[in-house]
Amino acid sequence: MCLVKKPSISDYWAKKSILCTPFPSSVMSRNRFKAVLSNLHLNDNNNYIARNQPNHDLFNLIMDEGMHGFRGQIHFKVYMKGKPKKYGIKLFVVYDVCTRYV
């Protein structure tokens, strides 16, 4: 991640004085950094094979969030006022475009 090598990414936000590295926590929180890192697309465009070419990979995935309506007693129930079903369980799903498998 930087000049200071640590065993895991979470160690850059450690609170103990022995492990403390103040710069990353001054820029952003650990959870925000992990969210940004999980959404980065790193690909070598020199190896890209266009559609309708031999050896083109048709593996297409889409990640989406959804709401399953639920009004029971659970601690992870969410409220979204803009949805048709305002109370429910928030789900993150991955779809395969070709096979429509969830």
Image: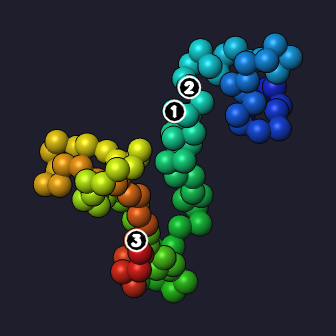
Is 1 or 68 nearer to us in this picture?
Answer: 68
Q: Say which element carries label 2.
A: loop
Distance from the alpha carbon under mark 2 to that under mark 1:
5 Å
Q: Say which element carries label 1.
A: helix
Q: Is disc 2 surrounded by few (<14), some (14 to 19) or many (20+) residues within 10 Å?
A: few
Please name the residue that numbered disc 3 is placed on.
95
Is 69 or 32 nearer to us in this picture?
Answer: 69
Which circle's residue, 3 or 2, is located before the other in the chain?
A: 2
Q: Residue at x 19, y 49 (%)?
A: 86
Q: Residue at x 67, y 16 (%)?
A: 23
Q: Residue at x 81, y 13 (%)?
A: 17
Residue 73 image position (x, y, % from top left): 34, 50
Residue 10 image position (x, y, % from top left): 70, 34
Give the residue type that dot 2 points to: Ser
Please name the residue that numbered disc 2 is placed on.
29
Please name the residue that numbered disc 1 is placed on.
32
Placement of the N terminus among the 4 image quadrants = top right
